[in-house]
Amino acid sequence: MTKIPYKIYLSEDEMPGNWYNLKAVMKELPTPFIHPGTLKPCTADDLRPVFCCDLVDQELNTTDKYIEIPEGIRDFYKMFRPSPLVRAYCLEKLLDTPAEIYYKFEGNNTSGSHKLNSAAAQVYYAKQQGLTSLTTETGAGQWGTALSMACAYYDMALTVYMVKISSQQKPYRKAVMETYGAQVVPSPSNTTEAGKKILADNAETGGSLGCAISEALEVAAKSDNCRYVLGSVLDHVLLHQSVIGQETKTACEKYDINPDIIIGCAGGGSNLGGLIAPFMGDNIDGKNNIKFIAVEPASCPSMTRGKYALDFGDTGQTTPLIRMYTLGSGFMPAPNHAGGLRYHGMSPIVSKLYHDGYMEARSVEQTKVFDAATTFARCEGILPAPESAHALRVAMDEALKCKETGEKKTILFGLTGTGYFDLGAYMSYNEGSIVDYIPTDEDLEKGFASLPDVDVDL
Amino acid sequence: MTKIPYKIYLSEDEMPGNWYNLKAVMKELPTPFIHPGTLKPCTADDLRPVFCCDLVDQELNTTDKYIEIPEGIRDFYKMFRPSPLVRAYCLEKLLDTPAEIYYKFEGNNTSGSHKLNSAAAQVYYAKQQGLTSLTTETGAGQWGTALSMACAYYDMALTVYMVKISSQQKPYRKAVMETYGAQVVPSPSNTTEAGKKILADNAETGGSLGCAISEALEVAAKSDNCRYVLGSVLDHVLLHQSVIGQETKTACEKYDINPDIIIGCAGGGSNLGGLIAPFMGDNIDGKNNIKFIAVEPASCPSMTRGKYALDFGDTGQTTPLIRMYTLGSGFMPAPNHAGGLRYHGMSPIVSKLYHDGYMEARSVEQTKVFDAATTFARCEGILPAPESAHALRVAMDEALKCKETGEKKTILFGLTGTGYFDLGAYMSYNEGSIVDYIPTDEDLEKGFASLPDVDVDL
């Protein structure tokens, strides 16, 4: 066996031609979206006014294990993929562990994260359908940036409703999106009825993700040639993100790497679901026995302390009902620095797999996350996004366990992005001023009180 | 011939084992450093108190064409190299040009630029010599960040004197360096005599690169175990940067790519000198006939409007005299957004090659540079550093010429880094508020007046 290179890059020929549809291999399927009025499953017709047609088909597809990645998307993927699978030789040495540690690094593109994988696909299909514009919301800014890049590439107009306080705190994120040609509207704004209403109630509000979603949805609903797009949670987003797992699996097979543990951070679940997809499929089929670990912040513990229940996807309670692990759409997460993990719910696919015992979940505190991030930056070079460092933290913990037991496990984690736009958080850490937020049981009860008092048995 | 992939990554086995020393193949050598007191060439003994020994040897080496890259540096290079040589298919299509365009992209590391190539080498040799700490200065922050990363990797203490106004304008650059463990001191400071003197004269000053250099040099000179390191201009820095050219040449040979034109931006000249090194060597030997173009800002036109003369490397006139293209150490460049190109002089090797007719030089205005940068970001994905976009601008101009003439030339340029920490500049461009600075002849005369009135004939 030749030494495994520090970075494994697949060739263009080896890049996956298909996404991996986990729902086609799951023994039991997640509950479909439920219409909150009728309490019946949403049909394709219910979804098409909001999402473009191909994405609706993908959202509802439970039969095709492989879905071909169109050439027009594969061409775009070639600009920033394949992403490297990196052997963390330096981290292993530093930890003095017998474990082998690998990470799949998705940060080598201007948006700085894996979000571009689904942005590319969603804009491509919108273009195919003849749509002329898209709307979305962004909080921390990773998704808005990724979508701006994809819209520039496919020549599609884009309006991003950016949480106002975030657009003020992160003017550079706004500048990147504008450089890519997107119109960025701080939300709440006077451009929508939803925004006007909120401003009338409180002119000084800094906005919220829930409000930005409402504004983006309203604009999309007004025009036949416009649709709304979303960067996580939904099944079709997980499908697109499976390109991460497909590449990882090809690289592992090429170099005979057999992960014992695969770890991903989980906010809405798209990166985790994408990374594990083909490996999980093999687990379900009994072909391997990998331990999967979802890592969430202790401040927003939807899997480790939430309920598996029907809930709305947004704070404004306007979406279909989704059965997922949730803290309740009324739960207000503390201002943890990993903005991308500050979501009350979890992907229905990831939730179902966790509920059925196919994976574990852990929550970690952010001080320990930044300890890991700083250690990693110094020895492996890459400055991780706070979100990504959640997975790193648990990978390091598992490697340290191996040091104790002497086990030579193979640990693989998803390094979803870089922290170049999160340096305010690193500054706080360097100054010793970040703190850990752990919701009390009382805090959680308040969130659970917002859960709708309905259920269905399909 | 198979289609050339969008991105060419060499394998680890194909990575260069040697740097390329241009001085060993040049028909005439640059004038050596001249001691301003004696007007005699500086000896190794003159340089060793300031620079570490191996670097002094490399600085003075005029005989060895190839210098082996030590394994301890190659291991670090594997963390962020090989860098991709990218075929700009999308840009070619957008420009509708028959030309083939390639770029060597050095931005895929946390420091965001090629600077890490020399930082790695300089810290490695300092460590080998048993030194315990280093000092340097940084303005825009790319060099300071690269050096911080290298010092973290090799476990070496580092103090960075950062121009005070820059440390205030770019707190995130400071945060990155501190995350990597460097001590960042806004300059002028009370930690040195030079700094105290400047503060006594003007307590409110925002500092300057010249002042920061003086502070860093003073601290290094005080301790036997500390040395000063520099990120450009010097021959040994160009030598380390030749890893860019070595990789590029290997990739070109592997895919039968034969550049007609190679273009690089030039501030101190290290990236350009490194990119062209082995190609220039072949030109000198008559083995090929590539056109080389150095691109500088119209606001700081050291090659296109400067003099080839003996001059100091710093504003404080404390360095040895260097024969180079210069605007005079007293020239004050306008506040162009490409901070890395705001230097009055130019690498003596690059200057000599230009003086002897081996390359061309062009100056470009920054509005046109940002036009090119934005176009490139939208079609090729990567948001370039303003410095790098100077080379891009001329590459696009050459490709457009090919469109007019119908010539199918192969154009290769160096994309030295990303603009993630330069978004203030992009914001100004998006708002239409950036302007072009072109020094008048009178402005230039003021700079030339600072040239020392000496010459030597060796």
Image (spheres, coloured by chain):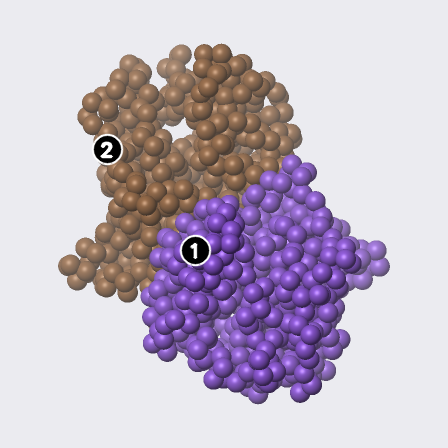
Chain colours: A purple, B brown
Please name whichever residue, A242 or B322, is drawn nearer the observer in this view of the structure.
Answer: A242
Residue B103 in the image: state x and y as whole percent.
Answer: 37, 54
Image position of A97 with respect to B136: above or below = below
Name the residue furthest front: A201
Q: Which residue in the protein does label 2 denote?
A: B438
- B428 vs A243, left or right, is left
**Tag 2, which chain?**
B
The numbered dot on residue A189 is 1
Residue type at mark 2 is Ile
Residue A30 in the image: state x and y as whole percent.
Answer: 65, 80
Please name whichever residue, B76 or A222, is drawn nearer the observer in this view of the structure.
Answer: A222
- Residue B446 appears in view: yes
Image position of A155 with respect to B79: above or below = below
Please name whichever residue, B397 or A436, is drawn nearer the observer in this view of the structure.
Answer: A436
Secondary structure type for disc 1: loop
Q: Residue at x 48, y 27 (%)?
A: B164
